[in-house]
Image: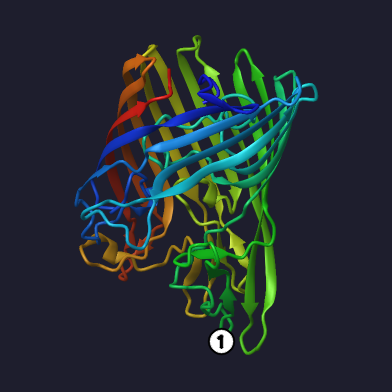
């Protein structure tokens, strides 16, 4: 976007238009009933009739429009505003029977202030999280995102796209330090069926468990059909990066806070419980002897960081007292991106996300929490069986490419092909007769995509 020529001016503002018209053919080996964003953790086990029931779908929802506004009040000061939207939303009347009326949604919307002489950069608004891997520096529109079609990227990468306030400092555009305060949200999972306001199973030696509250349905201007977690404080990201002739390298720390309300057994009041989580991560973008071949990679490890991976492993579960208990997790990916010709881009990525255990022993002698290893999972192996398997690891391999077969002052027309193989592993359980059960499943996705970039010259 930054390299596009100005389309027009409004007073002292330069206006650049961007985006593309997208048409994608999506095929999945299991029916997820999903649009052009794959729920990687949603591939079903053999108990589901959707397992092995292939899914075929056409979509234009990834069609995207963007606008970049820029002003330069002085030689050293630059102001920018960026808005980006696609049609990845849906309303209560949306369907694919006749009109496919999918709704616009905000992808990004932020403004930036840059003081070049000071090396100061400020961002406010909705943008890619500072945890996202970057190709250069830590400034927006320089993110090193996988070159894939799927709107849920690939398993193993680190990202969110959230409202935030970011302050960054550069030294000679080589060394970078940034701090971002970002909108929080937590995902929760438990081995038993448990909604906010539900009661935990009693722990060993106790007669009753506490009642726990952890989320509310959306209110004004939020989605009333989804749950929003209690958030005592924003997520905090601190990142350092360096750009050299040998590539771009970065490290960061992530801090998070999780809150719940606990009503102890026999009491008629609640008390708050706040727990700390977070992790450390790193990323790189390295040329392999030539600018036509790059190695990219990222890693994030910590407790309660599941939200930052495309698989959406849970951030927290609960301990025996009802306190939020951050789940240990690690995620990472490695990729090769090549440009064998000016009009061709090829890529291959491997990624993995894995979660650890957080359980307590119940009065019934069973484990409760996340990662329980004594669940009866025999139903996971046959159709219409009951399967309560919890995901331990999800690994994926992705390959594909893009070909710009028309390029000129009229824009660019390109075609893309993407294939992903995914394997999902659950925590082990048993069949109720003392035999181990180790549920696993797999999936394939194929995207065939065509895009027209009218402003890309």
Question: In this view of the protein, which residue sits in the foreground, 39 or 448?
Answer: 448
Residue 307 drawn at (x, y percent): 53, 51
Q: Which residue is mark 1?
A: 207
Lateral position of residue 431 relative to residue 126, left or right: left
Asked if residue 258 lies left or right of residue 215, the reply is: right
Secondary element at image label 1: loop
Say if 292 sits above or below 56 in the image.
Answer: above
Answer few, some or many: residues within 10 Å of disc 1's Cα (few below 14, many 20 plus, some between 14 and 19).
Answer: few
Residue 253 location (% of width, % of height): 68, 41
Q: Is residue 456 above or below residue 245?
A: below
Q: Depth check: give the residue in front, 288 or 359.
A: 288
Q: Residue at x 52, y 33 (%)?
A: 67
Depth check, front residue: 415 or 362: 415
Q: Position of residue 92 (x, y in %)?
A: 36, 63
| Residue 240 appears left or right of 373 | right
**Quadrant (top left, top right, bottom left, bottom right) of the C terminus:** top left
| Residue 276, horizontal then vertical, whole percent | 68, 57
| Visible residue check, residue 131 | yes
Query: Relative to 99, is 20 above or below?
Result: above
Residue located at (28% from left, 37% from top): 24
Say whether residue 9 is left or right of residue 347: right
Which residue is nearer to you in this view: 376 or 277? 277
């Amino acid at each position: 976007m930054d390299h596009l020529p100005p389309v027009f001016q409004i007073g002292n503002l330069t206006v650049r238009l961007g985006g593309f018209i997208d048409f994608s053919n999506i095929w999945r080996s299991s029916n997820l009933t999903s649009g052009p964003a794959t729920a990687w953790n949603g591939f079903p086990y053999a108990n589901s009739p959707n397992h092995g029931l292939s899914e075929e779908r056409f979509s234009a929802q990834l069609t995207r429009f963007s606008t970049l506004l820029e002003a330069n009040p002085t030689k050293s000061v630059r102001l920018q505003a960026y808005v980006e939207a696609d049609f990845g939303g849906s309303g209560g009347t949306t369907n694919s029977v006749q009109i496919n009326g999918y709704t616009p949604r905000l992808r990004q919307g932020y403004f930036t202030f840059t003081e070049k002489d000071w090396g100061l950069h400020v961002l406010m608004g909705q943008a890619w999280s500072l945890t996202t891997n970057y190709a250069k520096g830590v400034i927006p529109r320089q993110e090193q995102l996988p070159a894939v079609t799927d709107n849920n990227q690939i398993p193993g990468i680190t990202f969110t796209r959230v409202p935030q306030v970011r302050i960054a400092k550069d030294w000679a555009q080589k060394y970078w330090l940034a701090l971002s305060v970002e909108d929080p949200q937590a995902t929760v999972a438990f081995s038993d069926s448990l909604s906010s306001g539900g009661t935990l199973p009693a722990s060993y030696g106790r007669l009753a468990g506490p009642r726990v509250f952890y989320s509310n349905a959306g209110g004004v201007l939020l989605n009333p059909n989804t749950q929003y977690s209690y958030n005592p404080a924003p997520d905090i990201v601190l990142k350092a990066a360096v750009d050299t002739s040998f590539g771009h390298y970065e490290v960061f720390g992530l801090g998070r806070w999780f809150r719940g309300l606990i009503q102890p057994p026999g009491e008629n009041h609640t008390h708050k419980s706040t727990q700390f989580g977070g992790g450390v991560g790193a990323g790189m973008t390295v040329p392999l002897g030539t600018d036509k071949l790059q190695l990219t990679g990222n890693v994030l490890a910590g407790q309660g960081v599941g939200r930052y991976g495309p698989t959406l492993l849970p951030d927290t579960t609960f301990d025996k007292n009802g306190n939020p208990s951050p789940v240990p997790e690690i995620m990472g990916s490695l990729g090769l991106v090549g440009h064998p010709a000016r009009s061709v881009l090829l890529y291959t990525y491997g990624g993995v996300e894995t979660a650890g255990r957080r359980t307590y022993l119940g009065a019934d002698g069973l484990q409760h929490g996340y990662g329980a290893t004594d669940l009866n999972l025999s139903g996971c192996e046959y159709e219409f069986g009951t399967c309560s398997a919890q995901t331990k690891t999800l690994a994926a391999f992705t390959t594909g490419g893009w070909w710009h077969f028309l390029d000129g002052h009229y824009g660019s027309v390109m075609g893309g092909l993407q294939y992903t193989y995914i394997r999902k592993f659950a925590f082990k359980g048993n069949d109720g007769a003392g035999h181990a059960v180790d549920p696993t499943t797999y999936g394939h996705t194929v995207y065939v995509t065509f895009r027209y970039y009218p402003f890309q010259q």
